[in-house]
Image (cartoon, grey):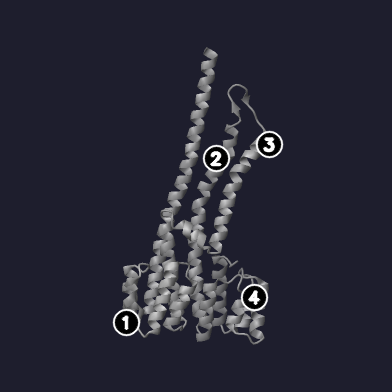
Amino acid sequence: MPLSHRHLAAWYQVLAQQLEAGLTLVEALQSSRGTGAPAAGLEKMAAVITNGGSVDDALRAGDPWIPFADQRSLSAAADSGRLPLTLRHLAARHAEVWAAQRRVVLACLYPLGVLHVGLLLFPITRMIDWEKGFLWSTTAYLHALAWELIPLWTIIVTVILLARRHHPLLTCVARLMPAVRSYVRTQALADFSFALGNFLSAGVPIGRAWATTGLISHSSHLKAAAKAMEATVNQGQAPGQFLASWACFPPDFVALYRTGETTGQLETNLSRLSAQNQEAANAALARATLLYPAVVFLIVAGGVVYFVITFYAGYLKMITGFAE
């Protein structure tokens, strides 16, 4: 499983600093322990290069914990001698994504806490009998609690694992959810713009840059568009004039890409597109972290209202019985 965004950002930043200071890649790898990267993996990568392997071979040795997209970017940068610059770009990108994820986690803690409190109290309400009183049973309580918490925890763990692995199933589910659907679309375009600009900055030819960016993209629409743009470049044509025919590229992407293509500022414009779409993705994520916790809170509040009504209904029934 890939390292977390926080650890990747720290590791890339240290590697860039050490390479810029004049260390060889082997020395930089060996001295970058303590940043979250596995020590055994770093030694394995250094050994591959020491034994005559390429940077690409070393990155493949770290395959389980280095994201595939990062491997392609770093391999291309090493071939063109722009590894420190690419490392800094990747470090900034992972730091930004980690900051967004942290905001989401913090926003979800309170509603999840409220939901758990509600689930802890709900089995107790079922033990109130208005004829016999409060009938506590530890076994019944734990059994009811298990039926509530285990499915909830299973869903949470499954979502986390699918998100870490970028599983397409999670993307399909997210596209059906309001606010989250907008986040998935804009985040995919932000990642695509960043990767394409990063490959071009690393000196990758534009046709290969489009092909590789499509390969690492998690969007099926962007994959198809990238493949078509690669064919366009191979035919000797510029991709800019064909982008508008693909719905996955909004007008602002098309306009900035064409401008960059014409003025020679394509890498700069792609970086600007990445930042714009990342900002839009963060805004969509912020809306989602307001909407869905509010839904959870309303569900818990509805349960509380139901409990109160049930309690007073039972109490009134008991009083009526005494009166009769």
Whichever of labels 3 and 2 marks the residue nearer the N terminus, that label is 2
Mark 3 burial class by Cα count in 10 Å: few <14, some 14-19, many 20+: few
User: Image check: 41 left or right of 97?
Assistant: right
Counting residues from the start of the chain, the first of labels 3 and 1 encountered is 3
Residue 117, image quadrant:
top right
Which mark identifies residue 139?
3
**What distance separates the C-alpha of mark 4 from that of mark 3?**
50 Å
Mark 4: which secondary structure? helix
Determine the residue positioned at 40% across, 59% down: 182
Q: Amino acid at mark 4?
A: Leu
Up/down of 12 relative to 54, above or below? above
As helix, strand or loop, the secondary structure at mark 2 comes to helix
Instruction: Kindly identify the amino acid type of the residue bearing the numbered disc 3.
Output: Thr
Q: Amino acid at mark 2?
A: Gly
The disc placed on residue 118 is 2
Looking at the rendered structure, the kind of residue marked 1 is Thr
Is residue 107 something that shows in the picture?
A: yes
Q: Position of residue 75 (x, y in %)?
A: 54, 80
Q: Which tag, 4 or 3, sits closer to the chain's start?
A: 4
Residue under pointer 4? 42
- Distance between the alpha carbons at the discs numbered 3 and 2: 19 Å
Mark 4 to mark 2 CA distance (whole Å): 46 Å
Secondary structure under tag 3 reads helix
Res. 207 image quadrant: bottom left
The percent position of residue 118, horizontal first and vertical second, equals: 54, 40
Label 2, label 1: how many angstroms apart (C-alpha)? 59 Å
Q: Residues within 10 Å of mark 4 (few under 14, many from 20)?
A: many
